[in-house]
Image (cartoon, helix red, strand yellow):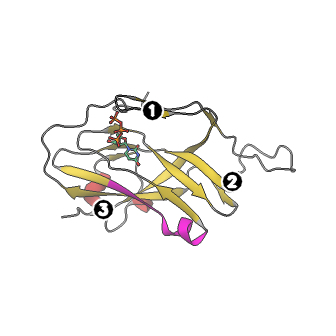
Amino acid sequence: MYKSGAFVAEHVTPVTDEQVQPNGVDLTLEAVFEQREPGRIGIEGKEVGVRHRRREHVVEGFGENDATDPYYLPPGGYVARYTEIVRIPEGHVGFIYPRSSLLRNSCMLNTAVWDAGYEGRGEGLLQVHHDIEIERGARVAQLVLCEADHDDVYDGSYQGENVE
Ligand SMILES: O=c1ccn([C@H]2C[C@H](O)[C@@H](COP(=O)(O)OP(=O)(O)OP(=O)(O)O)O2)c(=O)[nH]1
């Protein structure tokens, strides 16, 4: 059974009333990264290739704008990091869906499974199929939690990621 947005909100920090939806909690965009070096998925182990944080105001041909300008993203694949720290409680599994306004603007957020016991500021693959502007701090995704059986809890290399 999927849990209510109010329940999900207890496991997201920080969270405002505006982010709490009937069935989940909206997550906001903290940063956008562009991959510069190859990564590697091995039979044992994996490596994330070098990525560079994209500046908010890169607009081809328009020079430097104000630091408060939104991200201007031409078509391509980007790694999006969420602002909020998410904790997946035991007895649950998390899924993130893109905000539908992204799809309606020819963009997609690809996501994987959020394991019971995971805590951190996670990331997703932002596919841009048509130029789009996204403000830092804008809602881009929705986290939902579903009750789930499991044996162990998450103890992988991304545990505690991006949490100072
Ligand atoms: O779209 C997603 C999906 C999951 N996660 C977080 C939560 C999840 O619990 C953790 C690890 O995900 P996964 O188990 O898929 O990573 P892996 O590639 O198998 O690495 P590891 O073996 O270190 O867990 O990353 C994200 O940040 N984004």
Mark 2 surroundings within 10 Å by alpha-carbon count, few (fewer than 14), some (14 through 19), many (20 or more): many
Which portion, as a residue range, is magenta? 95-105
* Element assignment for label 2: strand
Q: What x and y, as percent, mark residue 38?
A: 57, 33
User: Label 3 vs label 2: CA separation?
Assistant: 30 Å
Identify the residue position indicated by label 3 in the image.
5
Q: Is residue 103 magenta?
A: yes
Task: Identify the residue shown where x is 38% and y is 50%.
Answer: 112
What number is the disc on residue 116? none
* Element assignment for label 1: loop
Task: Identify the residue shown where x is 34% and y is 28%.
Answer: 44
**Amino acid type shown at disc 2:** Leu
Note whether ligand 1 is within 8 Å of mark 1. no
Identify the residue position indicated by label 2 in the image.
73
Mark 1 surroundings within 10 Å by alpha-carbon count, few (fewer than 14), some (14 through 19), many (20 or more): some
2 vs 1, front mark = 2
Identify the residue position indicated by label 1 in the image.
162
Which one is nearer the viewer's eye here, 83 or 101? 101
* Element assignment for label 3: helix
